[in-house]
């Protein structure tokens, strides 16, 4: 049997790509991602941090629902020990499209 390679795209939208054996969606709620952004990029403050977060949120809310059917595995990355989730709808993980950013 052929053995494939595991390729990890972190921070890159790849759900639209063809020819992949499986896709994993790693998720953390907006408030967790916002806090991580502030810690990771301390040079971004106030409006700059909020704009960066809003840009990312807008992209994800438009992109992932379009390709949700291509995702095979879901991981909750909002805790210290990430855990696998059962398949779940994008409405559950991404929430309402009109949610305000927590920045």
Image (tube, rainbow, N blue to C red):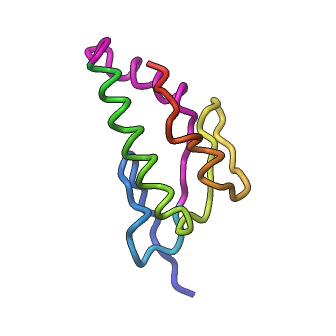
Farthest residue toward the bottom?
1
Between 48 and 74, the residue placed more toward the observer is 48
Between 30 and 74, the residue placed more toward the observer is 30
Q: Residue at x 39, y 41 (%)?
A: 58
Q: Where is residue 1 in the image (x, y as percent from the top left)?
A: 57, 87
Q: Residue at x 47, y 62 (%)?
A: 66
Farthest residue toward the top?
46
Q: Position of residue 73 (x, y in %)?
A: 62, 59
Farthest residue toward the right?
86
The answer to whether residue 51 is magenta is: no
Q: Position of residue 90 (x, y in %)?
A: 59, 52
Q: Which residue is drawn at 37% across and 31% down?
A: 54
Q: In the image, is residue 43 above or below residue 56?
A: above
The answer to whether residue 35 is magenta is: yes
Residue span colored magenta: 24-47
Quarter of image, res 8: bottom left
Q: Could you tell whether 74 is left or right of 66 in the image?
A: right
């Amino acid at each position: 049997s052929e053995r494939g390679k595991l390729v990890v795209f972190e921070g890159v939208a790849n759900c639209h790509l063809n020819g992949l054996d499986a896709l994993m969606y790693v998720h953390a709620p907006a408030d967790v991602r916002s806090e991580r952004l502030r810690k990771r990029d301390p040079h971004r403050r106030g409006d700059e941090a909020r704009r960066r977060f809003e840009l990312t949120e807008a992209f994800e809310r438009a992109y992932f629902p379009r390709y949700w059917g291509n995702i095979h595995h879901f991981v909750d990355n909002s805790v210290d020990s990430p855990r696998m989730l059962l398949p779940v709808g994008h409405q559950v993980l991404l929430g309402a499209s009109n949610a305000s950013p927590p920045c």
